Amino acid sequence: MTEHWRSADFVSAAHAWIDARLPELGLVRTGEVEQPHVYPWSTVMRVPTGAGPVWFKANHQPLRHEAALTALLARRSAGLVPAPLALDQETGWLLMADAGDRLRDLAPADALGRWHDVLPAYAELQLACEADVPALLALGVPDRRLPTLADSYAALLAELPGTDARLPGRSRVEELCGELAAFGVPETVQHDDLHDAQVFLRDGHPQVLDWGDACVSHPFFTLSVVLEGVVQWGVDDEPGSEDLAPYVASYLAPYRERHAGDLDEAVRLALRLGWVCRAVNGHLPGDPDATRTRLRMFLDGRP
């Protein structure tokens, strides 16, 4: 697929679309378009303009809903998700303003502290989108809600050779999903790959980008990647070196205003099941090792 993104036909069509959109936005291109990111599933181009760079993104067919999804989330998020400058829902092409500095590029202690701003704002977005589930599914956002997860997990294990023999069967995942559902937290949009290269700071305000992997699922599944994939490694990049409790508290603060019960126990269950969701939702047949890593995280909370 990377050959497609670099092909003369695609590049020419993308440049033509960009050049047609810029005047509509009052922008003038001031240099050559660069293509710094090319992956099998997407490509990103940097477009210099007199008002600063803007960014073009195209996804392969399974992720084309990202453009329309980003626009919907921008309307719900009070600035956490920036609105597209332009989009084409049929092709899934997006043009976005520059989002500033990546969280990953800050000093580690500063980056960790910023999660206390990001997590409650992100939780507020999830709460705001609870009523949008039918619209999200209609856009093509994958359905990874709890009733679907055990069957999807079983199908993944059947497809994937060389999985860990300790992995439980379908019935155990179904049991865990039932336990989590009993807390009564509605399912909603879930980024599913929320890490420190997806969060940007512009004028001091956090923004969350790259919603291509988003799905409809239990909201707390987000914490698997955020907490166990990023935060727990702390400032010294050592697993388990950062106390996760304050970050859980920041994320849960908006949920506690609406839900009673032991939400900390719900998070404990969701941390495990979130890796099942990530394994199912992010599985690429050409990259089985990433899926196996996520399944080991389901088992042990470590790669």
Image (tube, grey):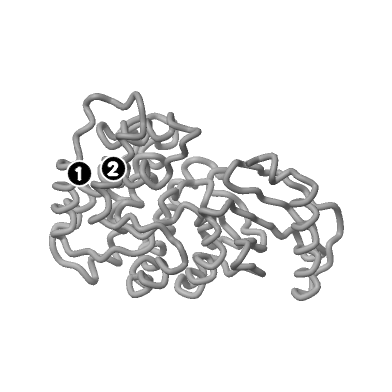
Q: Residue at x 33, y 49 (%)?
A: 223
1 or 273: nearer the viewer: 1
- Secondary element type, mark 1: helix
Q: Residues within 10 Å of mark 2 (few under 14, many from 20)?
A: many
Nearest-to-viewer mark from 1 and 2 = 2
Q: Is residue 66 above or below residue 297?
A: below
Label 2 sits on residue? 153
Q: Nearer the viewer, residue 129 or 154?
A: 154
Residue positioned 40% across, 66% down in the render: 137
* Quarter the C terminus occupies: top left
At label 2, the amino acid type is: Tyr
- Quarter of the image for residue 4 reads top right
Residue 194, image x, y percentages: 44, 50
Give the residue type at disc 1.
Val
Q: Is residue 162 above or below residue 219?
A: above
Q: Are marks 1 and 2 in contact (CB under 8 Å)?
A: yes
Give 182 or 229, whichever is nearer the viewer.
Answer: 182
Count the labels in the image. 2
At 48% from the left and 69% from the top, the residue drawn is 73
Residue displayed at 54% across by 42% down: 107
Query: Residue 118: x percent and y percent?
Result: 43, 58
- According to the picture, the residue beneath numbered tag 1 turns out to be 173
In which image quadrant can residue 170 be found?
Answer: top left
Q: Earlier in the sequence, mark 1 or mark 2?
A: 2
Q: Secondary structure at mark 2?
A: helix
Residue 183: give x, y in percent of width and height: 16, 60
Look at the picture and state if 69 lies above or below 262. below
Distance in Å between CA atoms under marks 1 and 2: 8 Å
Q: Quadrant of residue 240?
A: top left
Quadrant location, the N terminus: top right
Coordinates of residue 167 in the picture (x, y in percent):
23, 31
In the rendered view, would you say 145 is above or below 104?
A: below
